[in-house]
């Protein structure tokens, strides 16, 4: 870990020195709130280095962007670093990492180990037990992926021709330092079904940008899939994708302030018989004939303030 941090610091220093005169910087404060009683305040410092720029329209704006961010929620605090390399206008390469920890409050669990409950004789009773104290370990993430993006206005110029498409696909490794190989854990009051290991994340966005206060409307689709393997995971459905579908609208209050609204539905797992009533998820049996259904997920607002 120390070598990785040292390499990143050296890399940032070299890039800064090489492109010092043309570096652009910006700061952004983001406040997110949802109907699931989620609240996050995030600060992001961005550096844009004009590297690998060419003379062609597809390469003239090539750059390397570094986003350094810190966020806090009622149950967690996180730090993130992300590099985004644009070698050509329609392609981006993404790499980054994050580290955070959490605490627990009466309304939400920020960081816990999720264990199956047991009867006095040691047999499973169907319940779950959440164990662990505040800041009991760190959740760390490394990721890498790629973006393909397209704007119709690039080939048919015009203020009203910004039909945009963007899709990201990548791999992430995420782990809790105090969790064992077979432990499940809770972070930021999630479902408690995560384990140390790799998983896939992808998204698709189709939108329309307008020269109006309502500057963007679009559809966002996200997919997640655990890639780690464990005995019995097919029984409770760890091997099937989870999907989130959203409608997004952005309103520009001013050149520096915007508000986005996001309405989301998601897939949930269908289980056989009464196994879905078990609190510990690994005791449930997925219905292989009809494994998913759709449910309302959340409505969220996001406020962006450029400093």
Image (cartoon, rainbow, N blue to C red):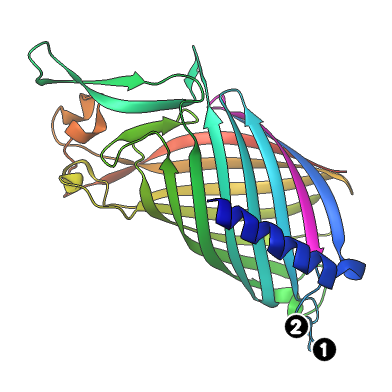
Q: Callout 1: 10 Å neighbours few (<14), some, many (20+)?
A: few
Considering depth in this image, is 18 or 223 the residue closer to the camera?
Answer: 18
Occupied quadrant, residue 258: top right
Image x and y of residue 284, in percent: 19, 34
Does residue 91 show up magenta in the picture? no
Q: Position of residue 56 (x, y in %)?
A: 78, 89
Task: Report the residue marked by disc 1.
Answer: 55
Which of the 4 image quarters holds residue 259?
Answer: top right
Q: Is label 2 in a helix, a strand or a loop?
A: loop
Q: Is any part of residue 151 visible from this angle?
A: no
Which residue is pictured at 48% across the width and 62% down the height? 170
Residue, disc 2 = 59
Viewer-side residue, 148 vs 98: 98
- Say whether residue 38 is magenta: yes
| Label 1: element kind | loop
Bounds of the magenta segment: 35-48
Q: Give the class, few, some or many, for how many residues have Cα within 10 Å of label 2's Cα (few <14, many ≥20).
A: some
Q: Tell which of 51 and 128 is nearer to you.
A: 51
Mark drawn on residue 137: none
Residues at marks 1 and 2 touching, judged by CB atoms closer than 8 Å: yes
Residue 175 percent coordinates (x, y): 42, 43
The C terminus sits in image quarter: top right
Q: In this view, does 180 lie above or below 60?
A: above
Q: In this view, does 285 lie above or below 222?
A: above
Q: Which residue is at the far right?
A: 21
Residue located at (29% from left, 35% from top): 183
Instruction: From the viewer's perspective, tell me whether residue 229 is left or right of residue 122.
Output: right
């Amino acid at each position: 870990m120390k070598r990785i941090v040292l390499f990143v610091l050296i890399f940032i220093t070299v890039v800064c020195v090489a492109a010092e005169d043309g570096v652009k910087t910006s700061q952004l404060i983001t406040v997110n709130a949802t109907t699931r009683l989620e609240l996050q305040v995030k600060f992001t410092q961005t550096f844009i280095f004009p590297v690998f720029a060419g003379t062609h329209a597809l390469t003239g704006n090539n750059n390397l962007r570094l986003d350094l961010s810190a966020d806090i929620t009622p149950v967690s605090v996180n730090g993130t670093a992300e590099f985004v390399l644009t070698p050509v206008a329609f392609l981006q390469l993404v790499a980054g990492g994050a580290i955070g920890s959490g605490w627990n409050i009466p309304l939400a669990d920020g960081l816990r180990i999720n264990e199956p409950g047991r009867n006095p004789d040691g047999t499973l009773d169907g319940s779950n037990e959440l164990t662990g104290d505040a800041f009991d370990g760190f959740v760390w993430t490394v990721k890498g992926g790629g973006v393909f993006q397209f704007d119709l206005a690039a080939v048919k110029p015009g203020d009203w021709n910004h039909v945009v498409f963007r899709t990201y696909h990548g791999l992430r490794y995420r782990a809790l330092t105090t969790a064992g190989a077979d432990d499940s854990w809770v972070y930021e009051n999630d479902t408690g079904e995560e384990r140390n290991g790799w998983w896939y994340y992808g998204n698709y966005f189709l939108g329309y940008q307008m020269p109006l206060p309502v500057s963007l409307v679009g559809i966002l689709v996200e997919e997640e899939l655990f890639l780690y393997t464990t005995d019995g995971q097919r029984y409770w459905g760890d091997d099937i994708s989870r999907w989130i579908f959203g409608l997004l609208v952005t309103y520009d209050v001013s050149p520096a302030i915007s508000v986005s609204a996001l309405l989301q539905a998601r897939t949930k797992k269908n289980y056989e018989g009464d196994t879905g009533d078990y609190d510990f998820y690994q005791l449930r049996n997925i219905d292989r004939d009809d494994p998913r259904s759709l449910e309302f997920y959340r409505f969220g607002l996001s406020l962006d303030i450029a400093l």
